[in-house]
Image (cartoon, helix red, strand yellow):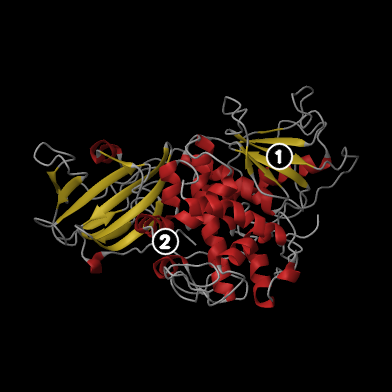
Amino acid sequence: MKIKGLATVTVILLAIAFGLTIIVSSFIEDDACRPVGGGSSVAGGVPDGHYSKPMKEGTHQISSGYRSPDRPDHRGTDMAADLHTPIYAFADGVVTESGPASGFGNWVVIDHEGPDGMFSTVYGHMQAGDIKVRAGDQVKAGQHIAGVGNEGQSTGAHLHFEIWVGGRYGGRDVDPGPWIDKATNPGESAPSPAPSRDRLRDRRSAGGELPPSPVIASEDKLQVDAVRVARSVAQKFPEVEAIGGWRPVDAFPDHPSGRAVDIMIPGYDTGEGKRLGDEITDYLFRNRDALNIEYLIWRQQYIPSEGQPSQMEDRGDPTQNHFDHVHVIVTGGGAAGPGQRYGPAPEGTGPGVGPSTGACDPSGVGDHGRSLNAGQIPDELRKWISLGGQVCREVDSPLLAGLLYHESAGFQATAVSTAGAQGYGQFMPGTWAAKGAKVDENGQVAGPPGSGSPSDPADATMAAARYLCEIAEGQREGIASGALKGDPQELMLAGYNAGPGAVQQYGGVPPYAETQRYVVIVPEEAAKFAGAE
């Protein structure tokens, strides 16, 4: 799974891997055949879009500042308070660390996606019994996560609070003071800048014939498939305020042919806008067959209906690079005739899911990307590799099969490396404790983190698929911004082999000989499991 014998990489992998589970829930909202990740999602104590002060005003005093003259190496702000005083999550995010930590006694680390990119918050010195979250949990800004303690290297009860721009591993620490000053006191109300996503979703229409929508600039000269895409998105995502389509002249034939739709993303350069664009892209990708989609472009990434996504060249501005809109190309369907009907919007029943029964199809026929040549795969793995190939757009079943084949030296359930990596996906015990889980018959997580077995076909295959997708999700922003260079598939595989932190550290595939070979040989193995086109 990762480079053997590199202690630094092992630490990075174990520490970083926890923070990427959000992608699982992002892709499974309406799909019973996709695995469900663990973690909690508890309503926050501040309005949507606001940061929360880590402690309520009046409950603490600042006892030591950031890199003060007497403590130049002090990377955070200390807030002295009574034992067990509540500590709150600074922002929406995912817990990556929770428990014992050198110097802190116990700590919590949370990764967040802010308007300017990823950052982490660190909370230190709590008593173990006061910590209310665990690695993998999703938290909301203002959520009660712990209580003030006096553990580790501490001179009195206090919260030690840090902020790391770019992430706790590979980023840089900054003064938390200005961030805290602009945050909202937890539990206080404040006007939300826009209606909440839930309120908007409550107003959407559902089922029945797709109606026209005022957010669509014009359906004139759009082909049938393009109209259906536009109406479906308008119905499913009422946050969208504008959808463009036909224009007479363009550098490419997409728009003049009536086969293109541009879904404009409000606040595209904010964390909320990026999430909305991802949700729309994922919804369309899951339903690409029903909507006759040929390919998508979002945030400079070309996403074909069949095959792996790839990074496009930099065209110079947010519009040309598709940062402010999702570009959708459909097969066509011809011009709409009198009385044209479009049917209902697809409900997110992605490939391999029966439209009426919701039953999973383990044959591999419905997998996205390349079809799976299941004849070379042991019977006990076929269903799970097929299901694993449906978790996200970056991972198809042949790629997953190639990875498992390579990792376990030919699909050996009991494979154990000299470093102690185990099973089909070669998970280290510590990594399995955070990433592994027992799954049910549909591949959905059915046990707590660390349950199941890395040698069980279902548990191991779905854990590998989830982890690959989590890595890909975590790398999307870096690829789009140019912070990560290289082929997206190779970057994802490098993260699996060497750890996401190593990829971030080097801004691309790390220069380790094993990783350089790994990103080449796994796709070569995957090609053996791809069916004939």
Q: Name the residue under label 2.
A: 136
Q: Is residue 185 above or below residue 10?
A: above
Residue 104 position by quadrant: bottom left
What residue appears at the point 34 percent right and 59 percent down from the top-left corner? 97
Residue 334 position by quadrant: top right
Residue 507 as seen in the image, left or right of residue 368: left
Q: Please tell me whether mark 1 sits on a helix, a strand or a loop.
A: strand
| Kind of residue indicated by mark 2 | Gly
Residue 345 as seen in the image, left or right of residue 67: right
Q: Please tell me whether mark 2 sits on a helix, a strand or a loop.
A: loop
Crowd class of label 1 (few under 14; some 14 to 19; many from 20; radius 10 Å): many
In-front residue for pair 41/482? 482
In-front residue for pair 240/165? 165
Please state the horizontal and vertical placement of residue 479, each as a whole percent of the image. Answer: 53, 40
Q: Would residue 366 be visible to someone looking at this image?
A: yes
| Sooner in the amino-acid sequence: mark 1 or mark 2 | 2
Q: Name the residue under label 1.
A: 328
Please state the horizontal and vertical placement of residue 280, each as a whole percent of the image. Answer: 62, 46
The label shown at residue 116 is: none
Mark 1 and mark 2: span between their CA atoms?
A: 33 Å
Please state the horizontal and vertical placement of residue 382, each as a whole percent of the image. Answer: 68, 71
